[in-house]
Image: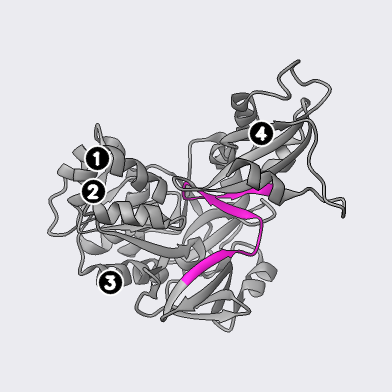
C-alpha cells in the first residue's frame, strides 16, 4: 500500500498535484500550509508516514471536530471529479474559475479540481493587485468563482463591478444571511449559497437543492447525505468513520428542515461554529485561553454576525497576573496566544472583560445572558 505525500499548500503546487492525480500519473497527497501550528495539525491528521488504508484515496484534507482534535478526511479521485462535474452541470456548463481562497480548504481545492476537469487554467486572485484585476484576466467562455460570505460582503462594498462579471459565484463555508442575499441581488450579483463540507467533497446542495447524484434525508432533524462526492473515511480512525458513515449515508453534525422541498440548515449539533468560512472549535479556543497566566475564567461563544456568519467572542475574567486596570490581557495579545497552538483564524475577534461570569442556579454559566449582551 502507498503512503501519502505532502505538498506545499500553494495554488501552483496543489494544481500540479491535482493535475497528475486526475490524469493517472500522480499519487495521493495532502496540502500543508506555511503556518507552523496549522502545518503541525495537518501532519497529526493525515499521518503521512503510515500506509494509506484506502487504495482509491486521492487527497487527504485536515479538518477538526467538536473536540478540536484534527481529523484527516480522505477524498477519492472519483469523489473529487463527481463534485466538479455535478457543479458544472448545475451552473450551466464548464468554465474558467478564479481562486480567491486557500487551496488546503475543500472549497479552494475544488476550485482547482473544477479547473482541471473543465480544461481551463484557473486565475489565482492573490497573484494580481486586486480581485478586480484578477477577474479581468479571465478569458473562459463562462466565468465562475467561489468564496465565503465574508468575502462576498467585502467585495460588494469595494468591487461590485467585478462580482457582476461572473456567471455565478458559489458561496460556501457558512450560511448566507438574508441581508447579504438581498444586497447581492440588489447589486445584480449571481451568488448561489451552497451547503456541504470537507466530508461531502465541498458543497453538494445548491440553494437548498441537492446536486445530481446527491440524496438527502432527515433523521430526528439531523441532516444525512448520500452520493458519489462523499469521503472514503477518516484517516486511521475506523471507529469514527463507522459512526458517521452508515449504509452509505453520512451523518452530519447539522440540524435541518425541508421547506417546499428545499433544505434549510438551522444549526449544529456540536460546539463548532463557522466564522468567515472557517470551522472554529470553541471548546479548544476556551481551553487555550485558560492557559494564559492573566486569565482566571473564560467562556468562548459564537455570536451571530452579518459579515462573519459567527463572530468568535471571548468572555474573560482577569487573573492575578492581569494588567492593572485592564481586566485582562489585550485582544492582540490573546489572539497571538491562541495562534501559537491553534489556527490563527480561530482566535477571538472580540474580548469582553468581566468581574465575574454570570451563573445560573444550576451552577452553569449563563451563556444566553452573555450572548444577549453582545448582539
Q: Residues within 10 Å of mark 2 (few under 14, many from 20)?
A: many
Question: Which mark is first along the chain, 4 or 3?
Answer: 3
Q: Is 80 placed left or right of 67 in the picture? A: left
Q: Give the residue pinned by disc 3.
A: 90
What's the CA distance linking mark 4 and mark 1?
33 Å
Q: Residue 360 location in percent, x, y?
A: 83, 51
SS assignment at label 2: helix
What's the CA distance linking mark 3 and mark 1?
26 Å
In magenta, the rendered stretch is 264-283
Q: Is residue 43 visible?
A: no
Checking the image for residue 159, the label placed there is 1
Q: Residues within 10 Å of mark 4 (few under 14, many from 20)?
A: some
The answer to whether marks 4 and 2 mark residues whose Cβ atoms lie closer than 8 Å is no
Q: Residue 80 location in percent, x, y?
A: 39, 66
Question: Which mark is first along the chain, 2 or 4?
Answer: 2
User: Is residue 265 placed above or below 366 in the rendered structure?
Assistant: below
Question: Which mark is first along the chain, 3 or 2?
Answer: 3
Q: Residues within 10 Å of mark 3 (few under 14, many from 20)?
A: some
The stretch drawn in magenta includes residue 275: yes
Q: Main secondary structure of the magenta part?
A: strand
Q: Residue at x 26, y 64 (%)?
A: 117
Amino acid at each position: 500500500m502507498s503512503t501519502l505525500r505532502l505538498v506545499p499548500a500553494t495554488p501552483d503546487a496543489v494544481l500540479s498535484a491535482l493535475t497528475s492525480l486526475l490524469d493517472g500519473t500522480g499519487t495521493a497527497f495532502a496540502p500543508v500550509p506555511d503556518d507552523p501550528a496549522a502545518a503541525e495539525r495537518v501532519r497529526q491528521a493525515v499521518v503521512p508516514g503510515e500506509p494509506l488504508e484506502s487504495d482509491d484515496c486521492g487527497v487527504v484534507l485536515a479538518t477538526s471536530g467538536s473536540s478540536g482534535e484534527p481529523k484527516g478526511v480522505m477524498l477519492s479521485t472519483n469523489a473529487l471529479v463527481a463534485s466538479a462535474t455535478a457543479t458544472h452541470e448545475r451552473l450551466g456548463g464548464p468554465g474558467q474559475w478564479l481562486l480567491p481562497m486557500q487551496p488546503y480548504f475543500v472549497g479552494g481545492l475544488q476550485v482547482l479540481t473544477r479547473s482541471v476537469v473543465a480544461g481551463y487554467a484557473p486565475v489565482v486572485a492573490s497573484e494580481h493587485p486586486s480581485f478586480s484585476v484578477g477577474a479581468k484576466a479571465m478569458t473562459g467562455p463562462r466565468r465562475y468563482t467561489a468564496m465565503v460570505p465574508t468575502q462576498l460582503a467585502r467585495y460588494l462594498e469595494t468591487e461590485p463591478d467585478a462580482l457582476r462579471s461572473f456567471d455565478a459565484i458559489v458561496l460556501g463555508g457558512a450560511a448566507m444571511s438574508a441581508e447579504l442575499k438581498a444586497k447581492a441581488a440588489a447589486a445584480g450579483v449571481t451568488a448561489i449559497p451552497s451547503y456541504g463540507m470537507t466530508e461531502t467533497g465541498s458543497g453538494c446542495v445548491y440553494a437548498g437543492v441537492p446536486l445530481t447524484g446527491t440524496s438527502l434525508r432527515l433523521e430526528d432533524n439531523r441532516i444525512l447525505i448520500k452520493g458519489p462526492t462523499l469521503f472514503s473515511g477518516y484517516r486511521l480512525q475506523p471507529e469514527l468513520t463507522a459512526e458517521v458513515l452508515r449504509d452509505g449515508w453520512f451523518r452530519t453534525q447539522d440540524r435541518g428542515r425541508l421547506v417546499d422541498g428545499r433544505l434549510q440548515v438551522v444549526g449544529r449539533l456540536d460546539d463548532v461554529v463557522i466564522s468567515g468560512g472557517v470551522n472554529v472549535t470553541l471548546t479548544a479556543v476556551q481551553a487555550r485561553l485558560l492557559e494564559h497566566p492573566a486569565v482566571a475564567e473564560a467562556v468562548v461563544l459564537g455570536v451571530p454576525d452579518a459579515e462573519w456568519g459567527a463572530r468568535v467572542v471571548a468572555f474573560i475574567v482577569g487573573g492575578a497576573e492581569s494588567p492593572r486596570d485592564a481586566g485582562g490581557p489585550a485582544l492582540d495579545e490573546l489572539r497571538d496566544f491562541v495562534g501559537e497552538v491553534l489556527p490563527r483564524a480561530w482566535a477571538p475577534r472580540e474580548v469582553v472583560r468581566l468581574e465575574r461570569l454570570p451563573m445560573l442556579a444550576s451552577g452553569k454559566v449563563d451563556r444566553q445572558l452573555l450572548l444577549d449582551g453582545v448582539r
